[in-house]
Image (spheres, rainbow, N blue to C red):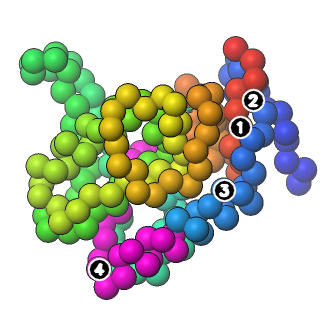
């Protein structure tokens, strides 16, 4: 089937910028780094839903270490803490105490989500925590983050596809698309 170069997701138009082939090549590279760096260990992969579900599935099939995976979500709701908002990691059904943890994320933009995730997970005393992201917008980062594994750095433009969404839609494409019209 011919792949579309331009797609419409709800009211916005996007054009293809990262092909499935390029994505797969970068995932293989990152997986090889993880296989080498974690040789002899049993990492726990924590895939952050919803955006990372396709990336996590492809990444894990390139990992040849004994490993576990759990799918987590950052739930945010109004609560009674000082900032007025409570953000909690939900769905973590593996005890990560003393384990090497690798967070699998679709995209790091401001980095605030990841910073919060790290803070919360550290409370459980894992042996180590590393970040593995499919995409990174370096010019948008607002916090200092040590991102050990990154498949691709991209400019500060909104993207969809390969798991990433615009308002819930657009996750189901094999390529990544960038917005061309607001
Ligand atoms: P951050 O906290 O600003 O780093 O935001 C991270 C989250 O925002 C990601 O996990 C995505 O869900 C979402 N996000 C940021 N940029 C994009 C984008 O270009 N397309 C789709 N989702 C995005």
Residue 145 against residue 15 in the figure, above or below: below
Q: Which residues are magenta?
A: 31-53
The N terminus is located in which quarter? bottom right
Q: Is residue 14 left or right of residue 98?
A: right
In the image, residue 105 lies at what x, y percent?
Answer: 44, 48
Q: Marks 4 and 2: which is nearer the front?
A: 4
Q: Is residue 97 left or right of residue 19?
A: left
Residues at marks 1 and 2 touching, judged by CB atoms closer than 8 Å: yes
Residue 40 against residue 146 in the figure, above or below: below
Query: Which residue in the protein does label 4 denote?
Result: 41
Q: Is residue 104 visible?
A: no
- The residue carrying pointer 4 sits among few (fewer than 14), some (14 to 19) or many (20 or more) residues within 10 Å by Cα, namely few
In the figure, residue 94 lies in which quadrant? bottom left
Q: Nearer the viewer, residue 96 or 115?
A: 115
Query: Which residue in the protein does label 3 denote?
Result: 23
In the image, residue 56 lies at what x, y percent?
Answer: 49, 59
Q: Is residue 121 visible?
A: yes
Query: Which residue in the protein does label 1 denote?
Result: 177
- The residue carrying pointer 2 sits among few (fewer than 14), some (14 to 19) or many (20 or more) residues within 10 Å by Cα, namely many
Q: Earlier in the sequence, mark 4 or mark 2?
A: 2
Circle 1 — which element? strand
Residues at marks 3 and 2 touching, judged by CB atoms closer than 8 Å: no
């Amino acid at each position: 089937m011919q792949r579309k170069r331009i797609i419409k997701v709800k009211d916005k138009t996007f054009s293809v910028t990262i092909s499935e082939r390029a994505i797969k090549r970068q995932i293989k590279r990152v997986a090889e780094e993880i296989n080498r760096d974690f040789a002899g260990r049993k990492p726990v992969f924590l895939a952050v839903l919803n955006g990372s579900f396709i990336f996590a599935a492809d990444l894990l099939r390139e990992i040849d270490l004994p490993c576990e995976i759990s799918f987590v979500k950052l739930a945010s709701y109004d609560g009674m803490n000082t900032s007025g908002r409570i953000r909690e990691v939900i769905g973590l059904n593996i005890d990560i105490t003393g384990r090497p943890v690798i967070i699998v994320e679709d995209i790091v933009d401001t980095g605030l989500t990841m910073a919060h995730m790290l803070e919360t997970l550290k409370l459980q005393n894992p042996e180590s925590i590393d970040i593995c992201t499919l995409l990174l917008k370096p010019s948008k980062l607002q916090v200092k983050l040590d991102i050990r594994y990154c498949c691709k750095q991209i400019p500060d433009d909104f993207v969809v596809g390969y798991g990433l969404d615009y308002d819930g839609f657009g996750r189901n494409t094999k390529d990544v698309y960038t917005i061309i019209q607001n």
